[in-house]
Image (spheres, grey):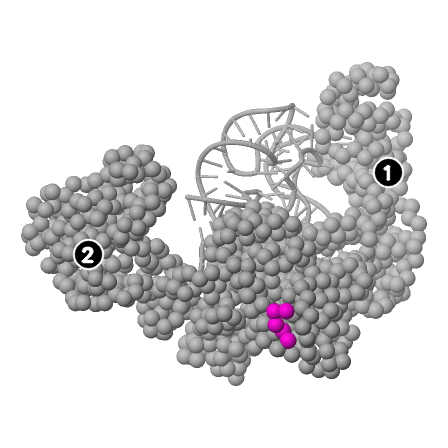
Amino acid sequence: MNRAIEKKWQDKWREVNLFQADPDNREKIFVTVAYPYPSGAMHIGHGRTYTVPDVYSRFKRMQGYNVLFPMGWHVTGAPVIGIAKRIEEKDPWTLNLYENVHKVPKDELHKLSDPEYIVEYFGGEYHNVMDDMGYSIDWRREFRTTDESYKRFIEWQLRKLKSMDLVKKGEHSVKYCPKCDNPVGDHDLLEGEGATINELTLIKFELDGKFLIPATFRPETIYGVTNLWLNPDVGYIELDNNGEVYIISEESYLNLSNQIKELKVIGEIDPNDLIGKFVVNPVTGEKHPVLPASFVDPEYGSGSVFSVPGHAPVDYVALQDLRSNEELLGKYDLRDVLDSVEIRNVVTIKKYGEFPAKDVVEKFNVKNQNDPNLENATNELYKVEHSKGVISDNIPVYGGEKVTVAREKIKYMIVDDNLGVVAYDFSEHPVICRCGSKAVVKILDDQWFLRYSEEDWKEKARRCLHNEDVIPNELRSNFEYYIGWLEDWACSRRIGLGTRLPWDRQWLIEPLTDSTIYMSYYTIAKYFKDIQLDDLGDDFFDYVFLGKSNESMVVNSNSNCFNGLVNIDKIKEEFNYWYPLDWRLSGKDLVGNHLTFHMFHHSAIFERDSWPKGMVVFGMGLLEGSKMSSSKGNVIILSDAINEYGADVVRLFLMASAEPWQDFDWREKEVKGIKRRLEWFFEFSNKIKEIKGRPINLNDVEELKLEREIDKWMISQLNLRLKDATTALEVFQTRKALQDAMFLLKKDVDHYIHRVEDRISKKDERVIYVLSTIFKIWIKILTPFTPHSCEELWEAHGGLGFISNEKWPTYDENLIDEKVVKSEEIVQNLIKDILQIKNIITKDLGKIHVYPCESWKWDVYKIAYEVSKPDIGQIIGRSIEDDLCDDRKELSLFAKKIAKEMTKTKYVGKIDEIAILNNEKDFISKEVGCEIVVHEDNSFDPENKSKQAIPYKPAIYIE
RNA sequence: GCGGGGGUGCCCGAGCUGGUCAAAGGGGACAGGCUUAGGACCUGUUGACAUAGGUCUACCAGGGUUCGAAUCCCUGCUCCCGCACCA
């Protein structure tokens, strides 16, 4: 198999528009997979994602369905903006990534400084690679999410949601670069990737009419404050906030000023002047001293910290440090002040003492503020207090409540009573934008939100989910959880490519929001080039998708088709034909957003009969056991894999190594193994031809009646494998389907060929018939997986037309014969047993005598089977009733034996062992290397072995 | 923390509506056949013991239900994934 042959078939399919799907009178299936965001080259992980729907589509097409498998390009969003900028700036890391990992030619590379060109370039690249993979896509429906007609569609959707009161305005915090004056995503960061935004409470402690506003995660600890900490080595400033004066560190100003409006800097202040003074706790009214501490991070919060030594290891240790620091104590004259500091308890936790901070500091053996163990101690205590802590009884109002509950209540109390404000900061510092300056948390206050928190909407989404098949079904509870958990979703953005919010054009529509119901767009996408943009108003979409008619509506054509007018009813019919969507395929990482949104939006906008019917969720890709990642270079580009192995091998491997929802692991050794497996299949066809001595004519395999058990066995296995593979494919189990249709069937065929070697050399007609039948069916089962190879073989062996158009073979349940399978098992087990005995005994061997099981034992076995559990008493009782054996002693011995045996063997009824043994005598003899004598009775039985025979297990006597 | 899913033989992985499970299949290793040789291909072995087809120990650990458990129940240990405004 080489690329040229694959290309040949791809061209032939294209020539006859094989995969273009239009409505007709067949039953339809509509499959979509998440359209790619083409910001880089396609790798083998993407290869798996898009091969699954292709295999399924091809399978269903062969079953006679009219299958639509379309593709589009999701190019809205921000990442390419950042990439383009970095290319523009000649950022070496980015250039290297695009040149060496994504394999962009040198003369194209610089053009990627235009974000539109990036998506155009890689969109084209994706399209080509998808063709190279042989995907059966209806390309007439290809589109980009920046197409004008798509934008009209999105605007319609958003207006629709707004009219249903599902969109509202609100505020929202984002990572933001003040210098670039733009929100930044993780892709735009030089440092601090993965930092999250945490909510803090700034609490106002009065000091001479001004306020220190230390930040905390744990507002409930306000009741345990003993002092405040300032860092004497950093600069502090005074701010005016609507008449109130705040004292914060210089370095925290940048962040806070992006959150609290109208902050004005009044002047600088020396922290040394504040140390030793007293502040007022706004909640308890107590006075606390301001003390110096080096651990205070001027960048975090507001650059001051309130100290809760009973529950914060850092505060506990800092207090200890200060007590023993004569220099500092002297400098600020703090000795008396410190003596008055008494540690407080706020939270009670089992297994901890009054001051849990003290316990963990001792447990981790923390020496001072700079001890690295301090972080571990803090983490442990915060975790335990959060999960198991209860507010101590001596605390007013909140005593006895769980920490998690009290924390929220206290936060609201502080904010409502104007004792503090909520602010945000990063979970880690520093966070640096690509431009080199520090990023901050900014509050955007005119954001638009989708109201996923609306209970009515959630309920609709739940009903939508309830109607869907979820593969794998284990994820269903995940979806239920996400529907319940989703809050309002910020659906507007400042930067990126995309559609503008129709009623507030300063905003772009967020790229997950524009990808929720676009599957409906595919159904009619092929018409848009013929429709004037001005006609794509709300009434167009209302009519086509929802059936709402508007008499004044006119749809004008751009071209001459439909006599200058587009037949809108035809468009509407096409939508009605393909919808609802049968299967939606998407990645595991999109369960909590895209796939869930997909249900929200479908249920809000469409009538119930247009709600989606099924979802398949994909796993991730590994490369030789470790996670694949383009940005780390740990990736194999799909086109490289195709060039090296051929598309069919890549397809086969991706489908065979794991089920779609599992993580697959690209291991070169195993890929090569798969390649040999496919080559073996080609050899197999040649072998048949060779045995036959003339070409196979796949269109005309003459049917013969089979008599030999082994031939029937082979046909039985073939039907079994076909059945299992078909069943598996119905539910997207590509791996299982290939296990059955490729590996197990191959094993069966190997076995069969081995078993009939002597007949092959005699060119036995029936063997040729069996082999031809296998090939005829097998090639069709493999067609969805390796379409190019199968077309080639089909053509080479007399097939007419495309095998892609052939009917999927149907299995014959009657040909799957348990008795035939059992017969073969008897032969194989007999050989195994003889070899085992030979292995154990050392004497020289003569002839081997075999004795089939006596008739009465079969009857007892049948009774045991009917009793269905190893109840020896009942088995013997019923056997005596039926008068099966005169020798009671032997009967009971056998009953015991069979009671045990029946749990190890499957009962399929009585089998004519004599006939089988006589038939296969020569084969057995050849396998064990001794002469075999088959006895019909025990007239020759020197060691009385014949008695040992049990059903399916003839007795053996070795001379 | 919240939510979800796991822990199987040298490795990957199936099985998990209880009995046909010493446990599919692949990879690796070993032996034999074929071959000038290697590769490929085919056959066999790959828990332990065993001079008659057997026995014992095994599916994270511990306990339970059952005539019978990798499979069901409880407990513990442990691993992975998601937790958002990002595609």
Say whether residue A712 is visible: yes
Image depth: mark 2 or mark 1 in front: 2
Q: In front here: A35 or A50?
A: A35
Task: Point out residue A429 in the picture as x, y percentages from the top left corner.
Answer: 32, 61
Tell which subunit mark 1 falls on: A
Q: Which residues are magenta?
A: A535-539
Tell me the tag on residue A681.
Answer: none
**Residue at the spot 86% in from the left edge and 19% down from the top edge:** A882
Tell me the tag on residue A917.
Answer: 1
* Label 2 element class: strand
What's the CA distance linking mark 2 and mark 1? 100 Å
**Residue at the spot 86% in from the left edge and 63% down from the top edge:** A698
Q: Is residue A321 above or below residue A128?
A: above
Q: Which residue is mark 2?
A: A211
**Residue at the spot 89% in from the left edge and 42% down from the top edge:** A919
Looking at the image, is mark 2 or mark 1 earlier in the sequence?
2
* Label 1 element class: helix
Task: Point out residue B75 in the picture as x, y percentages from the top left corner.
Answer: 47, 32
Q: Dot 1 surroundings within 10 Å: few (below 14), some, or many (20 or more)?
A: many
Kindly identify the amino acid type of the residue bearing the numbered disc 2: Phe
